[in-house]
Image: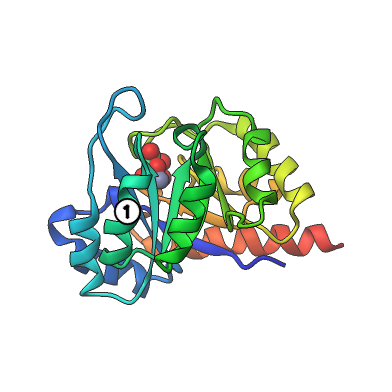
Amino acid sequence: MVKPKIVPSMLSSDFANLAAEADRMLRYGADWLHMDIMDGFVSFVPNLTIGAPVIESLRKHTDAYLDCHLMVTNPLDYVEPLGKAGASGFTFHVEAAKENWQELIQRIKSKGMRPGVALKPGTPIEEVHPLLEAKDPVEMVLVMTVHPGFGGQKFLPEMMDKIRALRKKYPSLDIEVDGGLGPSTIDLASSAGANCIVAGSSVFGASYPAEVISKLRKSVLDAQAGSKK
Ligand code: DX5
Ligand code: ZN
């Protein structure tokens, strides 16, 4: 069974206190930290966030797994700097890597990072199949459940079909969901088969973030226990 991973999205944190925010989330039970890297190219994502220098600074303060989600037009340009900065996972968008995903995966691995692929809500799940069946495959799929760009958007339940299809075909794959996850939507994602749960506003906006983190984990564990019966 794939392990549940609860992954607070640092996009909802206080960027001016990033190291303290990261520590706090780890103390509350986070498994990984989700780092949203956006380049602001409106054709791809209408927001600009952080890059390798911020990852490098954070890395000096923590050993945590830094789960980097690249919403950028040319992910290849980020492999070298993010590898040097100490990123752990490098998840690029399939829409931005049509021509060079093989090279990208190889380069990500050669820099000691774990390759993942993400897809936008409008992209069919079949588009990631070749990347999972390649000689050098991606090791995680991130299914976006909002349109990329901002925290705090409404969860798109229609995306659950993608997760179900993926889980059926790849029982031991890490499947991450990102966007609009919290106590009221988690059961849909976990019962569809997601095991890595990104949550920004629902965790950072809660009075007791540790409770939200443990609720999210319990939902994944319960769904997994239920699907074994
Ligand atoms: C959106 C980002 C998400 C975002 C999720 O483009 O990829 O990681 O921070 O935030 P919430 O959980 O608030 O939807
Ligand atoms: Zn993200």
Report whether residue 118 is seen. Answer: yes
The residue located at (12%, 56%) in the rendering is 16
* Neighbour tally class for label 1: few under 14, some 14-19, many 20 plus, Cα within 10 Å: many
Position in image of residue 213 (x %, y %): 46, 62
In the image, residue 37 sits, relative to residue 16, either above or below, namely: above
Position in image of residue 130 (x %, y %): 67, 42
The C terminus - image quarter? bottom right
Camera-nearest residue between 207 and 141 = 141
The residue located at (62%, 55%) in the rendering is 137
Tell me: is circle 1 under 8 Å from ligand 1. yes
Quadrant of the rendered image containing residue 226: bottom right
Q: Callout 1, which amino acid?
A: Phe
The residue wearing badge 1 is: 204
In the image, residue 153 sits, relative to residue 215, either above or below, namely: above
Report whether residue 212 is seen. Answer: no
Instruction: Give the tally of numbered discs.
Output: 1
* Element type where label 1 sits in the image: helix
The residue located at (79%, 48%) in the rendering is 168
Quadrant of the rendered image containing residue 1: bottom right
